[in-house]
Image (cartoon, helix red, strand yellow):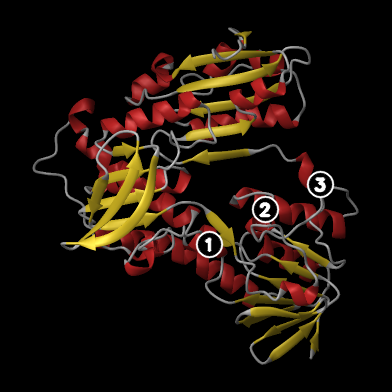
Amino acid sequence: MKTYDAIVIGTGQAGPALARRLAGAGQKVAIIERGRFGGTCVNTGCTPTKTLVASAYAVHVARRGADYGFTIGGEITVDMKRVKARKDDIAGRSTRGVERSLRRLENGAVYQGHARFMAPREVAVGDDVLRSDRIFINVGGRASVPDIPGIDKIDFLTNSSMMDVDFLPRHLLVLGGSYIGLEFAQMYRRFGSKVTIVELGPRLVPREDEEVSQAIAAFLGREGIEVRTSANCLSLSRHDGDIVMKLACEQGAPEVAGSHLLVATGRRPNTDDLGLDRAGVKTDGRGYIEVDDELRTSVPGIWAMGDCNGRGAFTHTAWNDFEIVAANLLDGEKRRVGERIPAYALYTDPPLGRAGMTEAEVRRSGRPALVGRIAMEDVSRASEKGETEGFMKVLIDAESKLILGATFLGTAGDEAIHCVLDVMYAKAPYTVLQRAVHIHPTVSEFIPTLLGDLVPLKEKPA
């Protein structure tokens, strides 16, 4: 048995950073990784998918050349092997960088293999048994596959296996009309595939306000993507070389057939094979590790960070988990998850930037509120770029004047949202942002404009 001051299981966004802080403080740290270094973000998530989104965007702009006053001779075609090679190169640099930094870490030892708890203070990896009074779980998550009759008899893709695709699917079926599914649907349509999205719910991205769902469905439809909502998938089968989905739906044909299927119906934590029961670590009904506001589990001396704790599903929340744990353990601070403002983006084109509460959540809260809204077609920078889809919306507490939330669906929406987010963290009234002088011409310069034209948030019509 080998004893360490700390054991870090998993090398996603939170794990390596914490290992470096602990090792830098003179602690002897064991880092365990069973697969590729860097976790979801650099291998199958943010880095590779946004690289693919960039390639798809370039193709889209090239096809729109006439809108900008230029023409390209001949048809715009896509070499998917080169698209994948570019993605692999960029993602690979990140993966290798994480591994290199950990293997060179002074006071650190890297173990490659599957970690399993043997006891609350003992972790087995291969033939080694490691012991520590401080263990940090950072094992991430993976695609959740629904129990649909026939799914075990067909080949299907997930966000992970999509990273191996170096060809153009003739007709890509996307089961799941939320964040992951929409990004892949649009990029592959732009690459040249026929695409059909099948969403079980009544609208796309049901977590968002209805106007967001409607706007996204509209611009995807204009790009030639078929969207089937309220479409309960009853079964999957193979017929004449195609994958056939039988549907129970309010509108449309009872079947849809395609050459390939992407299952994008959610995520699940990688906690079912860690031996958590032997450590006494509690999980909830979905397998997420239960943690308190400082990310401590039910067992003293064990923490859980990142996607596996159910307190966030993003790279930035995992990084913040690291910051919270490191600050509390090493810096004498008292930071908490509850201080975090929900914020994220959807990387369709145009992108969606979100911070704080949605309009629906504000209405449910019952508080008096104000709302400011502007269409992207009225934003000069959007018109200059020829990208006028979407809108910007900010919600204000009518009594405190604090910003409750914002939704930016439009060009640069994923960047401009931070203007609002920073003011929210400062707990400053919206008037601070309203009176700011922003640079022209930018998308952000219209945030003060919409804040100067607030109206009471009305009750939603029945």
| Residue 98 place in picture, x, y as percent | 58, 67
Vertical order, 375 against 165 (above or below): above
* Three-letter residue code for mark 3: Arg
How far apart are labels 1 and 3 at the CA level? 26 Å
**Looking at the rendered structure, which numbered label has been put on residue 121?**
none
Helix, strand or loop status at disc 3: loop
- Tell which residue pokes out farthest to the right in this image: 332
| Residue 389 place in picture, x, y as percent | 37, 25
* Three-letter residue code for mark 1: Arg
The reply to whether the C-beta atoms of the residues labelled 1 and 2 are less than 8 Å apart is no
Vertical order, 217 against 272 (above or below): above
For the residues carrying marks 2 and 3, which lies nearer the camera in this image?
2
* Three-letter residue code for mark 2: Gly
On the question of residue 442 being in view, the answer is: no
Q: Quadrant of residue 186?
A: top left
Q: Residue at x 70, y 50 (%)?
A: 320
The reply to whether the C-beta atoms of the residues labelled 2 and 3 are less than 8 Å apart is no
Quadrant in which the C terminus appears: top right
For the residues carrying marks 1 and 3, which lies nearer the camera in this image?
1
Binning the other alpha carbons within 10 Å of mark 1 as few (below 14), some (14 to 19) or many (20 upward) gives: some
On the question of residue 430 being in view, the answer is: yes
Q: Left or right of 183: which side holds 128?
A: right
Q: Residue at x 60, y 20 (%)?
A: 394
Residue position for label 1: 142
How far apart are labels 2 and 3 at the CA level? 15 Å
Q: Left or right of 51: which side holds 141?
A: right
Residue position for label 2: 310
Vertical order, 279 against 330 (above or below): below
Residue position for label 3: 336
Which is nearer the N-term, disc 2 or disc 3? 2
